[in-house]
Image (tube, rainbow, N blue to C red):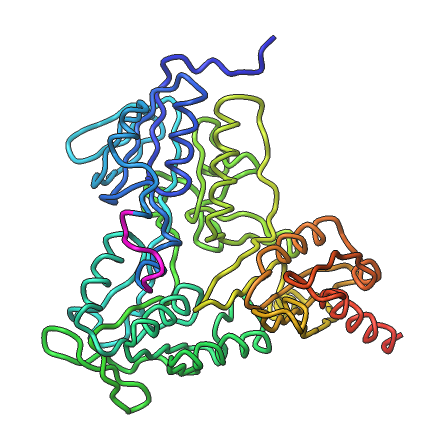
Amino acid sequence: MSDEKNNDNQKIIIIGGGAVGMAVATSLTRHSDYSVTVFSADVHTAYSQCGMPFVISGEIEDFKTLIRRDKKILKDMGIDLHLGTRIDSINIKESTVTSGEEKYHFDKLVIATGSKPDIPSNIPGTSLGNVFTLRTLTDAMRIEEALKNASSVVIVGGGSIGTELAAATARRNINTILLNRSHSILSHNVDPDMAEAVQEHLESLGVNVITGYVPSALNGEENVSSVTISSTDFPADLVIFTTGVSPENELAVNAGIDIGSTGGIIVDDYLHPSVSGIFHPDIYCGGECIEVLELMTGKPMLSQVASNARRMAGTITKNLTSKPVKFDPILNPWVAVIGGLQVGTTGITSKKAAENDIKIVTGLATGSTRAEYYPGGSKLFIKLIFSDEYLAGAQVVGGEGVKERIDALTLAIKKRTTVHELANIETCYAPPVATLQDPTGFAAKGALKKMRKKT
């Protein structure tokens, strides 16, 4: 007997044309008989958001390169694609969605509405011209156009997008200020001691990093001309806010879908949303609009990394076409490349551990990405975080080899690897790619030494 579900002639509507929505749509057209309709408020689809800062930096030739499938290809695949079309409401009881005067029936529904940028509402001048956020390809194109005649830019928010953009504009010889409310950049991703290396790198590129402040005001007549920071006015031909995002969940709220403490949609292990406390079997949700469980704390969190969005899309597709599968709690591994410097993290940070009363011991090590005598190497900084002698988090900063280490350390956390095992880790060696002893082992030995002192 086949495990395949009978989906002949069933209509599936997908709201959202981002990483989750389009991955589900394209998979279903290949592996099922669903009639697939996608609605997206965006005028572009099937493009890489993560690549946008690298077009702005000039490392990628143009924005067209980021579009992985054009509209014609998607329609030729059998997807009924509605771009620039906003869904106004969902009626769960009637199994319909409404856009303008049109009503559409569904047998199955996927909500993948993503997130929206947060701009502080208490800062005067945010409605001036040349004030931007970066979420869509259209946003990126507008920023690129404004940068052509710009000599100064202020980027507000020192997270991953803000730091990548700061490196990008500095590369174009534009006077760049990166302004961050916290005293440490990348504060959601890495600890302050690891962020220091990133800040020093940005400053070496010419970025003026100002921490511990928010803008007092954006000044100008029609377009922004300066930003007031602690009573000092700094010239700004444009301002880009990268101060975070929040789930785009107005549709879900109005439809009676339950929202959790993070602002994301509450879902079960199969990514069904909760509707008045009951998980709906014919609706799935995924991406930045939902909350999922964090492995180390067991608490709900939002995930804004594309790799998890693609995994969610895979879970939804399998649950629509074959045996049910679960989306397990996540470690949310993350990596960014900031002006050539790679930064990665997985598991909990020291800050997250403190917020959850998790006792930790840390180990730090500095090494090199290649043998000292081999050209092209760079410094490598590794921080390991242990709880009850098990690896609970890791942070890596360096010129190369960061992504591979974060991937391996993510698996090590899930496999409950001990400090003793990592202190005696067996690693490979060749001068062009590694030192004789990997600094991961030294970081573990540093933590083990602290533990022995305590006992």
Q: Residue at x 15, y 31 (%)?
A: 101
By secondary structure, the bulk of the magenta-drawn segment is best described as loop
- State the extent of the magenta-drawn residues as a range: 57-64
Please tell me whether residue 117 is drawn above or below residue 206 in the rendered image. above
Q: Residue furthest right?
A: 455
Q: Residue at x 49, y 22 (%)?
A: 321
Location of residue 26 in the rendering, given as x and y in whole percent from the top left corner: 39, 29
Q: Is residue 47 magenta?
A: no
Q: Which quadrant of the figure contains the N terminus?
A: top right
Q: Nearer the viewer, residue 77 or 156?
A: 77
Q: Residue furthest bottom?
A: 231
Quick check: 188 left or right of 119?
A: right
Residue 89 placement: quadrant: top left
Q: Which quadrant of the figure contains the C terminus?
A: bottom right
Location of residue 371 in the rendering, given as x and y in whole percent from the top left corner: 68, 69
Quick check: 285 left or right of 119?
A: right
Please tell me whether residue 6 is drawn above or below residue 123 in the rendered image. above
Q: Residue at x 29, y 30 (%)?
A: 73
Q: Residue furthest top?
A: 1
Please tell me whether residue 124 is drawn above or below residue 345 in the rendered image. below
Quick check: 329 left or right of 243?
A: right
Quick check: 424 left or right of 211?
A: right
- Say how many tags the image has: 0
Location of residue 334 in the rendering, given as x and y in whole percent from the top left corner: 53, 57
Q: Nearer the viewer, residue 388 or 399?
A: 399
Q: Is residue 58 magenta?
A: yes
Residue 9 placement: quadrant: top left
